[in-house]
Image (cartoon, rainbow, N blue to C red):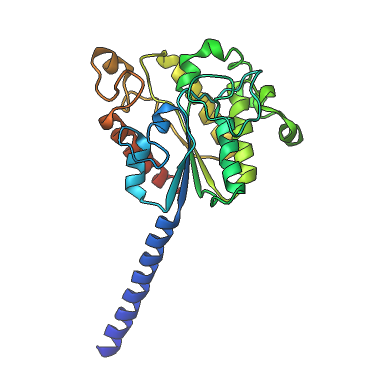
Amino acid sequence: MHDFLLIMKRKLLVLVSILAVAVVSARDIRYAFLGDSNTWSGGVGCTQDDSWTYWFMQQFMPASCYNYARSGATWTNTSETLRLPLDSSAVLGPQNVVFNQALRLIRSSQMGQPAPDVILIMAGTNDAWFMAKRPDMWSMTVEEAFAVSEDQLAKMEPNQAVSLASSIRLTCETLRRAFPMADIVLLTPTQTTKAENETISRISDIIEGCGMILGMPVVRLDGEQYISSKQESRQLTFTKDGVHTNRSGARRIGLKIASLTNKYGVR
């Protein structure tokens, strides 16, 4: 009996040690966020509760987070988009794209900021809302964007990747080269009263298609079970204005993203 209790005690100590390491590891993880206004609204430290980033962070309580999102940002580059890592404009424009957010994150890391372990990117709403400002958005399919060779991609400037699919690929491959050990998660936009559901779904399909080829988890949020454009048109429920989440909408989205990233095994 004494030997049995001793063995069980040792096993319990090992289990406690493993759990302790797991907790410490979870809290050591660093998250980086890129995207548009529903991500940007969380603030640099993701402390504002009308953004999904706040509720996501409450689930994981990691070591730190870096929020590089900006209001007005699009996935899609334009013929005028340049490599401008210092650009931090918060209105729709050719330089306010996720690609430049990625460059800012990379620059910060080069200047001494610890590299992120997980990068989450949520964009696409403004691509749908302001399609006229992104005239080449549909100019390439996912398959065409990935037909470009790795050598060509490495030399490509953002104003040469002006379709949605090629913009996503260029941005994600740039991040992957800079942070090869990081998990990169792509989040599709939610429904909005400012764009047709079909357009949001089409954009989400392209994001998902790129993610599948890149081997990156994709969380689809374009279903009406998250934010319903019909409901928001009738009565604002989870948004303030049909686009930007209120506290309830942010919590709803943030907790869902947290549960799905856990499901996909993201750290």
Residue toward you, 228 or 59: 59
Question: Residue 261 vs residue 112: left or right?
Answer: left
Decide if residue 259 is in sight here: no
Residue visible at 55% across and 19% down? 93
**Which residue of the protein is positioned furthest toward the bottom in this rendering?**
2
Quadrant of the rendering where the N terminus is positioned:
bottom left
Q: Give residue 148's position: percent from left, percent from top.
A: 72, 29
Residue toward you, 130 or 173: 130
Image-quadrant location for residue 63? bottom left
Please determine whether, in this image, residue 116 is positioned above or below residue 224. below
Residue toward you, 50 or 86: 86
Q: Give residue 81's position: percent from left, percent from top.
A: 63, 23
Question: Residue 177 vs residue 254: left or right?
Answer: right
Q: Give residue 168's position: percent from left, percent from top.
A: 58, 29
Decide if residue 248 is in sight here: yes
Image-quadrant location for residue 24? bottom left
Q: Give residue 265's position: percent from left, percent from top.
A: 44, 49
Residue visible at 63% across and 38% down? 174
Image-quadrant location for residue 51? top left
Q: How many marks?
A: 0
Please determine whether, in this image, residue 132 is positioned above or below residue 10. above
Please determine whether, in this image, residue 199 is positioned above or below residue 35. above
